[in-house]
Image (cartoon, helix red, strand yellow):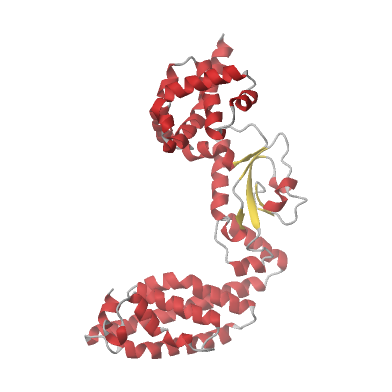
Amino acid sequence: MVLVSAIRGWAGVADGDALVAELCRDLDAAAVLPPAVAHSVLVATRAFVAAEGRSEDAARQAGPTLMRLGRRAAVRGHSAGQLSSDLQRVVEDRARLADPVIARVRPAEQRDAIRCRLRQFLHQVHHAALAGHRQAHTMMALAPKARRDMVARALFASESVPEELLALGGVDAETRYTPVVWVDGSAARAVADLPDALVDGTGRIALVPTARLPELTVLPEERAISGPSRPAYDVGDALALCRQAAASVRAGIIAVDVPLTSCADVAGELLLAGRPALTELLVDKYLAALRDLRPTRRVEVGEVLLTWLESREPLSVIAQRHHVARQTAHDRLRVGKQLLGEALDEPAAHAAIVVALHASLPGWREEVAARAARS
């Protein structure tokens, strides 16, 4: 590191951690700064050192922490002017404590460059904290419903909403929500009796408190997809996955036969949705031998094999699920195992075979139906 190497050997500084410890040694003293401010100073110092003094890079690393500090100050009633004044004192104090360290840097040009970068970084830190304060203060000026609507819009945009803003919007950051996307039908109707649920502007997407998901009613003529349950502060990825699954169902890439389908139930199809080359690769690698079977036989063997791979249930249970005799299920599984051969002895291949079967069976069933229609 350029910054560390410039002062190595002074005051026992050997690496970045040692430099951070030297610059923040006063923070260990009792009541030097409030805990949140002291933590922010430590984060900012680490960012500046880790970025080797590059102020823009350091500001990107430390910015979220400083914005959080500003939001919390606003929530606690501190004015922007008071926060700015307090921050200015901290900034001046940090610059003063850093100066003896920087003074040891040689040559002078490098020393002046580090001082300049530090001034820029401290200005950016100050700006980030005030931006966080402004963000929270703007939201606090709104009526409760407007706050909740603002939080909902941010969540449906798949953004990571800060905990302070969630709280201002009346949403507990730790409450788990399940995203539900309607392919056909109305989210607004379905969650009308669930006041804690959030609905997007289209009326087709809802975030339902997971604890209340059993109360959700999807009509028989509707189709909806539910995603993984996540805390409110971390629901973005789950919502994006749910949207992807719904789009695949709407496009006919994934077939569903019940009103409400979980992403977990179509995980294999979802993994391959929109990736025909990958689907073809897996099918060619693992299921090529099944193509030699008659279409009806291929479906029969494939369905039993898939059930066995996913559940590992006793043959009697598998037979019941497929409405066939135990011996029939045994014969179909035996054929499937023979055709797949050594691949079944590789645990890592099991997931790939399951995915390939999920991708292939809908097409195989369509082929059987088409033949039956022609005969």
In the displayed image of the protein, which residue is found farthest to the right?
193
Percent position of residue 302, x then y? 51, 24
In the displayed image of the protein, which residue is found farthest to the top?
375
Q: Is residue 347 visible?
A: yes
Left or right position of 113 against 230: left
Numbered circles on residues, count: 0
Q: Quadrant of residue 56?
A: bottom left
Residue drawn at 59 percent across, 48 percent down: 228
The N terminus - image quarter: bottom left
Residue drawn at 65 percent across, 81 percent down: 77
The C terminus - image quarter: top right
Q: Nearer the viewer, residue 324 or 50?
A: 324
Q: Is residue 42 above or below residue 309?
A: below
Q: Is residue 80 above or below residue 60?
A: below
Residue drawn at 36 percent across, 76 percent down: 17
Residue drawn at 59 percent across, 79 percent down: 73
Q: Is residue 251 above or below residue 16?
A: above
Percent position of residue 203, x then y? 67, 48
